[in-house]
Amino acid sequence: MKNILVTGGAGFIGSNFVQYILEEKDDVFLVNLDLLTYAGNLENLKDLETDTRYQFVKGDIRDRELVSRLFDEYDFDTVVHFAAESHVDRSITDPEVFLTTNVLGTQVLLDAAKAHWKLEPDNKYSREYRAGVRYLQVSTDEVYGALGKTGMFTEATPLSPNSPYSASKASADLLVRAYYHTYGLPVNITRCSNNYGPYQFPEKLIPLMIHNAQQDIPLPVYGDGMQIRDWLHVKDHCVAILDTLERGRLGEVYNIGGNHEKANLEIVRLILNELQKPESLITYVQDRPGHDRRYAIDNTKIRSELGWQPSYTFEQGIHETIQWYLSNAEWVRRITTGAYQEYYAKMYNVSEEKGKPT
Ligand code: NAD
Ligand code: TYD
């Protein structure tokens, strides 16, 4: 692993990963290709501006010419593909961009990796690739659909996505699988549970609830608030991705999860408690259409094959995360003005002034 292409490195998990890799590895050169959509924020990476091992490129993963040119210019041996439209609620309102970015964008990257890494690119029967190359698809447990009260997703669980977001991620996973089986492209897919931690955009549950609580505006809980997610600190996700790049068996899927199942309401109460805000701020709003009730990850494979395990307890991770948001109020303020206010008002059916969901 010498020349790495990271896509979506200005987003939440991507920016944590870029920082982590450059801390962990001295002898790498990393290009971060990111379109800087509403979710991309170069402020997350400002400490790297003078690092000669790092190069930012503003651009679209759907741009074949650009992606191919970057492969020529930087001779990547590793691709870590984070770039995506990532929010379920937005996918319900506007699914199309989820398909073009998450599915077609993935295909562009797979084609570029195949063209640049295959030893005999014009021989359709050849399955030989340069030594040491690898493409890693960052996916999600949501591709498996929803669970009832019991059970866990293993890597053998059939894909059964329920939202336009998870359907687009499952489609991308199937393309990655097909490029492995048909062309022998050296790939891995990782499927992680819900992440939390620094730099998460406040459209997602945890930073949204922290932000609203601090502003003393209502905390919109969908339905009865008893939906369950498995939560993992973003740094533990980054470690699992590096472990997979270094030791994962080619062609394999690895589930990543923290064994921290929590009901949404429990998390909202915990945040209010830590911020010393009243529970009367909780407001039950109409449920998300098609809302998945429960996700849970069986992480046996990555634990036993790669020796990975989460290092954060949920209690420690959530405490540090809340403190991070308190200490980075300026970061939050800059991304919650303008377009965010418009998004919030429309998504939660509130007046921009009052912030009250109906
Ligand atoms: P995010 O929305 O915070 O960041 C996405 C990044 O991709 C942004 O920087 C954005 O500018 C960039 N991007 C979007 N479209 C692009 C395009 N066409 N070309 C180039 N860049 C583009 O997302 P995240 O939460 O950091 O998630 C990263 C990846 O991890 C996604 O693939 C997501 O499906 C997956 N994932 C997320 C979670 C989670 O809990 N957040 C859990 C499991 C898997
Ligand atoms: P989210 O952070 O959007 O992640 P995902 O839908 O990918 O799991 O939501 C996490 C859970 O929190 C999910 O069950 C939906 C719920 N939720 C709310 O109750 N209110 C909110 O305002 C948001 C954003 C999420």
Image (cartoon, helix red, strand yellow):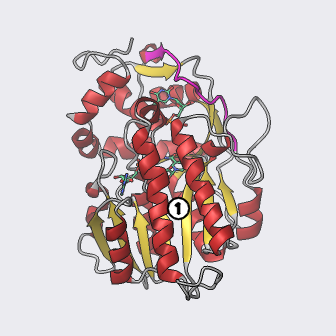
Horizontal side of residue 31 vs 329, given as left or right: right
Tell me, yes or no, whether the highlighted magenta stretch contains residue 259.
Answer: no
Q: Is residue 227 above or below residue 153?
A: above
| Residue 43 image position (x, y, % from top left) | 26, 56
| Residue 150 image position (x, y, % from top left) | 79, 33
Please tell me whether mark 1 sits on a helix, a strand or a loop: helix
Three-letter residue code for mark 1: Cys
Which residues fall within the magenta stretch? 282-296
- Which residue is more in the foreground, 51 or 318? 51
Horizontal side of residue 358 vs 287, given as left or right: left
Q: Is residue 53 above or below residue 301?
A: below
Q: Is residue 240 above or below residue 93?
A: below
Residue wearing tag 1: 238
| Residue 192 image position (x, y, % from top left) | 60, 51
Is most of the magenta stretch helix, strand or loop? loop
Q: Which quadrant of the structure image shows residue 10? A: bottom left
Tell me, yes or no, whether the highlighted magenta stretch contains residue 288.
Answer: yes
- Which residue is more in the foreground, 310 or 43? 43
